Amino acid sequence: MGDFRRGFKTWCENVAYGFRRDLDVDKFGPLSPDALAAHLSITVWTPDDIPDLNRKSRDQLLVRDESSWSAVTLTLPEGRFIIVNSAHSQTRRNNDLMHEIAHIVLEHEPAQMVTSPHGLMFLDNYSAEQEDEADWLAAALLIPREAALKVLAGSADPKEAARFFGVSESLMKMRISRTGIDRQLRQRSNARRAS
């Protein structure tokens, strides 16, 4: 993960708490990506929700080639739509959906836009910097630092904390290490043992 502009990580934390406030969600509680999408007037679909998608295309997306994609954002005259891969686990879908929402919140413009023959615009191929920013914001939205610290300080292990936030254990562990929570918890533990 690359270096971010000054203040970006703090801004992400503030956005995470701001959306929780807007949605009347506990500051330290989990934030549903579906609820955030609805709040932002983003329609969330799976391939089964796509009008007129034939069975062969559906099976290609969800059975034969399900590992080749996670989520895609469409901009249509009716608004923004995010299509998530329903063949993936719920925790992965939560992260994939929040990642796409993060691109929208960050107002990222893709480096390349693909337009279908029917004029539908697929937002695709973001720059590496934009992908890193969306990854960080998505993780902050799902697991704000102070919320993770509070849950983990209450004797929850990363697996339990991941379940609480509705994310994968690997995302939880990554968030713990990249935000310095692991060091902070070790220092607290060492201080308790020393006293």
Image (cartoon, rainbow, N blue to C red):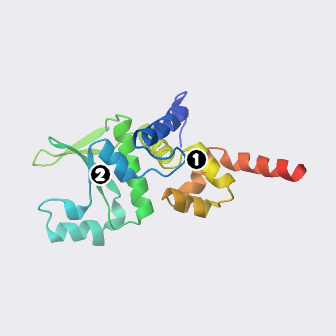
- Of residue 15 and residue 26, the one placed in the foreground of this image is 26
Report whether 73 appears left or right of 176: left
Residue 4 visible in image: no
- Report how far apart the C-alphas of labels 2 and 1 lie in the structure: 29 Å
Residue 158's label in the rendered image is none
Q: Where is residue 182 in the image (x, y as percent from the top left)?
A: 69, 50
Q: Nearer the viewer, mark 2 or mark 1?
A: 1
Give the tally of numbered discs: 2
Q: What residue type is labelled 1?
A: Ala
Badge 2 or badge 1: first in the primary sequence: 2
Disc 2 residue type? Val
Q: Horizontal and vertical percent for residue 112?
A: 28, 40
Asked whether, in this view, residue 43 is left or right of residue 140, the answer is left
46 in relation to 74, above or below: below
Question: Badge 1: how crowded within 10 Å, few (<14), some, or many (20+)?
Answer: many
Residue at 41%, 66% in the rendered image:
89
Residue at 21% in and 67% down: 58
* Residue 43 in view here: yes
> In this image, 126 relative to 152: left or right?
left
The residue at 64%/48% (across/down) is 149
Residue 80: x, y in percent? 24, 44
Q: Which residue is drawn at 34% across and 34% down?
A: 107
Label placed on residue 72 = 2
Residue 105 placement: quadrant: top left
The answer to which of 192 and 112 lies nearer the viewer is 192
Q: Which of 10 and 150 is in front in this view?
A: 150
The secondary structure type at the circle numbered 1 is helix
Query: What x and y, as percent, mark residue 63?
Result: 29, 72
Label at residue 147: 1
